[in-house]
Image (tube, rainbow, N blue to C red):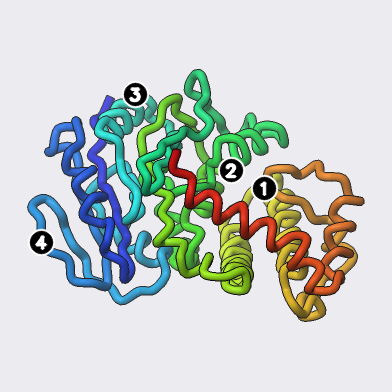
Amino acid sequence: MPNPYISVIIPVYNRTQYVGDAINSVLSQTLDKDKYEIIVITNVDLPEKERVRIIKSNERWQGPMVAQCIEEARGEVISLLDDDDLFLPDKLEVVYKVFRENEKLGLLKNPIKYRNEYGKEWLGIVPKEALVSTPNDLNIDKISEFIFKYGVGVNSSSMSFRKIYINDYLSYLREIKLAVDNFIGFVFLFTNQVMIWNQPLSIYRVKSNSASHKLASLDQYIEHAIFFLKINYEDDIVTYNAIKNSNFAELFEKRINYKKIAMKFWSKNPGEVKLTWREILNAAPLHNPRIPKWKVLAYYLASYLPYFLKKKLVFERLYKRELKKYTIHD
């Protein structure tokens, strides 16, 4: 079977605090150095480093940055790495082996290890054995399992994919602002063979300083949540348009409608978000497409509660839970 060359892509916009560690985690891989390359695309000046190709770009959004690197990459397989995450030492060795042994594999999604700034580590959900899905064997239960339980559309740093299968979607990827992980995960889940690996291969850093802006106050947290809800909604529409799969379209339309309800719920002026009754009754999160219609309707009606009640009963609790996540150190 052919030996796949790997291109590791690291997009960097403005922040540089952790990118050195990210790059070093790739340079220190157990895989032979002649089997992979490192591409960093950034708008900032970074010190030159042997074996690291730096592409300068003033692009603000991640989708166009990643799309440009994919076009210029030498590799048959692409591994993404966020500038503040890390690869475990054997990540690329496993990626190389899995893609060499599975010629039809489109996407390899690995479990992640979480690490906060106090050194506390914990694992996400790890299957006992590798799991495989193809578009032909997808059903609602499997979609829910792969998306909700194993996070197929979450965390770019845990995704490696065959370049040839993404080339036809690059024009859509350029329209994605932030949800590159959603886009790539869903494109491959509904069009190609996807494998969930059975061991963690990357580290997701949970950092209080990166969250300090959005957690500075409850109002700042709400403002941040609304901003990203809107961008994620727009990215979802791009993803919906990209994938020509009737089963996917029906489920994803429900997801988009549910996002609109969420934006309405979080807004100070819910009347600004317009929904038809068809959209309300045809809304569901992608990980739970069987959610009862009465729950969706209750969510919609709750959006009309006085803002101070939503803030006190819901937003404040979510804010405190988010704060706690960044301060656990024992």
Quarter of the rendering occupied by the N terminus: top left
Disc 4 designates what residue?
Answer: 48
Spatial CA distance of label 4 from label 3 is 35 Å
Any part of residue 187 in sight: no
User: Which tag is nearer the camera, tag 4 or tag 3?
Assistant: 4
Spatial CA distance of label 2 from label 4 is 39 Å
Q: Which mark is residue 190?
A: 2
Q: Quadrant of residue 241?
A: bottom right
Q: Position of residue 171 (x, y in %)?
A: 45, 64
Disc 3 designates what residue?
Answer: 101
Q: Quadrant of residue 143?
A: top right
Judge whether 140 appears above or below 291 on screen: above
User: Which tag is nearer the camera, tag 2 or tag 4?
Assistant: 4
Helix, strand, or loop for circle 3? helix
Judge whether 108 appears above or below 66 on screen: above
Residue at 40% from the left image edge and 61% from the top image edge = 209
Disc 1 designates what residue?
Answer: 248
Q: Position of residue 78 (x, y in %)?
A: 33, 46
Residue at 24% from the left image edge and 59% from the top image edge = 40
**CB within 8 Å, label 2 to label 3:** no
**CB within 8 Å, label 2 to label 1:** yes
Q: Quadrant of residue 87?
A: top left
Q: Earlier in the sequence, mark 2 or mark 1?
A: 2
User: Which tag is nearer the camera, tag 1 or tag 4?
Assistant: 4
10 Å crowding of disc 2: few (<14), some (14-19), many (20+):
many
10 Å crowding of disc 4: few (<14), some (14-19), many (20+):
few
Q: As rendered, which of 282 and 222 lies closer to the eye?
A: 222
Q: As rendered, which of 31 and 72 lies closer to the eye?
A: 31
Spatial CA distance of label 1 from label 4 is 43 Å
